[in-house]
Structure formats: structure tokens, C-alpha cells
Image (cartoon, rainbow, N blue to C red):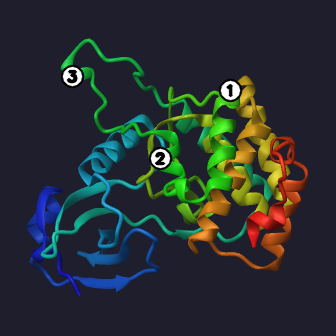
């Protein structure tokens, strides 16, 4: 297993650097789709070491800077302690350990989730080019919406056609900061404190899509009742920011179907029932010529 002293640290907290040669424990945690995750116990303090040793190659220097800025703004994220390159040329990020993923769900947690997502969307960003070099926010990336959230969609002409029609109708924007994958798996809890993790997808984007994807995941994995309550809480805190909800729900549905075809999402009979239920009640999906949710899903 990798040791902290074997990593080439580009940036590292000085207190950790001084103790890096001391004995420390490395405890593997559940890996993500993009990286392996390890709990590090050093000087009686827990940390998380994330190693991007799979296909994904995000800019971890950017993510390190982003976490620093978000901490300063008061958004509850993991504190970054360092980033670097391991002996296999994989990027690594060392952060605080902030607990385990949320598994118990209730209305109060959903209410907090809604407020936190709105706070993320309110993070001040400069959409236009800043006047000074110091004002630049290079730690926030900007991507092409379809290329980023619908990778390889060109191989699936049925989805490709609907997605491109939809983004014209809802008029995709990139004028806010978004998390990009806000779901229960990316919220951890320790001693009653909730922390948002996994900022790999943080970018300039459309808060309407960010919210719709989050509501969609709550609905299909936790149930329609929770999904409706969470959506109503988002509407209450965001106001007019979240228009075109049904159109973005359709985009979230299509993205999940695309990921499902690639085998990257958990699914069972109840999840599939909920996914089909959304499709049969969504105007944008039903308006598509020859649309059949069962044909898309199986």
C-alpha cells in the first residue's frame, strides 16, 4: 500500500510534512468510480487520501484550490491539506476526514441538503473575464455541457437526438457554480455535522440541471415521497432560479439511462419502476416521436 512519504507533494500542510515520516495507518475505504480512497491516521488525526488511478484524470491542483476557496466562503467542504503525484504518476489529494456517507434520510436532512445546494449555487463567480489577474477564478473549470455530462452520447443516436433538442428548448446556461453530482453518496456526516465531498465535477454550469440531477437521484433511490419533498424545499429556497424543471428532469433521466447502458449505476426492480414512472409522466420525454421508456431501458 502507498505511503505518504512515497508521494511527491506539490503542496502540503507544513505540520503534516514534518510528521510524514512517522508511523501511520492506511485503511482502504470504498473506492469510487474514478479513484481509490484511503483513510489515513497520522498523529492521532484522521485524513482521507484520494488516488486517481483509474481512467479519470481531473485537474487536482484546481480541485485543491477550489476546496480552499469554498472553505473560506463558509461552504461545508473537506479541508484540503495537500496534493501531489504518486510513484505511478497518479494524482493524489489529501483532505480532512469528515465522516461516513449519509444512510438515514428524513425531512430535516433533505431540508439541509436543499439549503446547502442553494448556497453552492450562490457562490460568487465571475462569468465574464475579470479585469485583473488576481480576480481570475481559474480553479473553476468550464466544460461543454453535452460533452461533459453525456460522454459517448454520439454512440446512442436515440438519446443523442433528444438531448440536443432538449438543450435548445431549456437554453442551457453556464452562469453559476455547481457541484455537478450532488447526491447522498457525496454527503458525509460526523457528530451531526454534514460535509459535501467529491468536487471533481465542480464547474461553471446551470443550477437547474444540478438541482434536477440531485432530485432525480433522491427520487429513484430513496422514493417518490422523498423526491417530491426535496424538490419542494429546493423550490422554496431557490425561488425563480429553478425554472424549466420538467425539461431538466428529462435531461437527468436521459443521463442516467446513458450511464446505465455503460453499466455505471446501481439498479434493481424498484429503481427501474421509479425510473419508468418518471418517464411516463414527463412531458418532454412523452412528446418525443416513437418514445418508449421500456425500449430505452432494456
Residues at discs 3 and 2 in contact (Cβ within 8 Å): no
Q: Which mark is residue 257?
A: none
Q: Nearer the viewer, residue 232 or 215?
A: 215
Quadrant of res 296 = bottom right
Quadrant of res 107 = bottom right
Image coords of residue 43 (percent x, y): 23, 75
Q: Report the quarter where the C terminus lies.
A: bottom right
Q: Which mark is residue 147?
A: 2
Name the residue that disc number 1 marks.
Answer: 241
Q: Report the quarter where the N terminus lies.
A: bottom left
User: In this image, 41 relative to 170: left or right?
Assistant: left
Image coords of residue 171 (percent x, y): 63, 27
Closer to the N terminus: mark 2 or mark 1? 2
Q: Secondary structure at mark 1?
A: helix
Residue shown at 40%/41% (left/top)?
Answer: 70
Q: Is residue 248 above or below residue 172?
A: below
Residue shown at 60%/61% (left/top)?
Answer: 192
**Distance of label 3 from label 1 (alpha carbons):** 29 Å
**Distance of label 2 from label 1 (alpha carbons):** 24 Å
Q: Secondary structure at mark 2?
A: helix
Residues at discs 2 and 1 in contact (Cβ within 8 Å): no
Q: Which dot, 3 or 2, sits closer to the camera?
A: 2
Name the residue that disc number 3 marks.
Answer: 134
Q: Is residue 241 above or below residue 264?
A: above
Q: Nearer the viewer, residue 200 or 107?
A: 200
Q: Nearer the viewer, residue 99 or 262?
A: 262
Image coords of residue 91 (percent x, y): 23, 64
**Distance of label 3 from label 2 (alpha carbons):** 30 Å
Total residue callouts: 3
Amino acid at each position: 500500500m502507498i505511503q505518504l512519504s512515497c508521494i511527491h507533494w506539490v503542496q502540503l500542510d507544513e505540520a503534516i510534512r514534518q510528521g510524514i515520516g512517522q508511523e501511520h495507518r492506511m485503511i482502504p475505504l470504498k473506492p469510487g468510480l474514478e479513484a481509490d480512497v484511503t483513510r489515513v491516521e497520522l498523529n492521532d488525526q484522521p485524513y482521507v487520501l484520494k488516488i486517481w488511478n483509474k481512467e479519470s484524470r481531473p485537474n487536482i491542483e484546481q480541485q485543491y484550490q477550489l476546496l480552499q476557496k469554498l472553505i473560506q466562503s463558509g461552504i461545508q467542504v473537506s479541508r484540503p491539506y495537500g496534493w501531489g503525484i504518486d510513484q505511478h504518476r497518479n494524482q493524489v489529494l489529501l483532505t480532512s476526514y469528515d465522516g461516513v456517507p449519509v444512510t438515514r434520510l428524513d425531512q430535516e436532512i433533505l431540508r439541509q441538503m436543499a439549503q446547502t445546494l442553494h448556497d453552492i449555487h450562490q457562490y460568487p463567480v465571475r462569468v465574464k473575464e475579470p479585469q485583473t489577474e488576481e480576480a481570475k477564478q481559474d480553479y473553476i473549470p468550464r466544460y461543454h455541457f453535452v460533452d461533459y455530462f453525456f460522454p459517448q452520447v454520439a454512440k446512442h443516436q436515440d438519446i443523442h437526438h433528444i438531448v440536443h433538442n432538449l438543450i435548445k428548448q431549456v437554453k442551457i446556461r453556464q452562469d453559476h457554480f455547481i457541484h455537478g453530482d450532488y447526491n447522498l453518496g457525496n454527503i458525509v456526516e460526523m457528530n451531526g455535522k454534514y460535509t459535501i465531498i467529491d468536487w471533481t465535477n465542480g464547474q461553471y454550469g446551470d443550477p437547474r440541471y444540478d438541482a434536477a440531477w440531485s432530485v432525480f437521484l433522491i427520487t429513484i433511490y430513496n422514493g417518490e415521497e422523498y423526491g417530491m419533498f426535496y424538490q419542494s424545499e429546493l423550490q422554496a429556497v431557490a425561488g425563480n432560479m429553478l425554472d424549466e424543471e420538467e425539461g431538466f428532469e428529462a435531461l437527468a433521466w436521459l443521463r442516467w439511462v446513458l450511464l446505465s447502458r455503460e453499466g455505471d449505476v446501481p439498479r434493481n426492480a424498484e429503481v427501474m419502476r421509479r425510473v419508468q414512472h418518471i418517464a411516463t409522466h414527463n412531458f418532454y420525454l412523452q412528446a418525443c416521436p416513437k418514445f418508449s421508456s421500456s425500449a430505452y431501458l432494456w
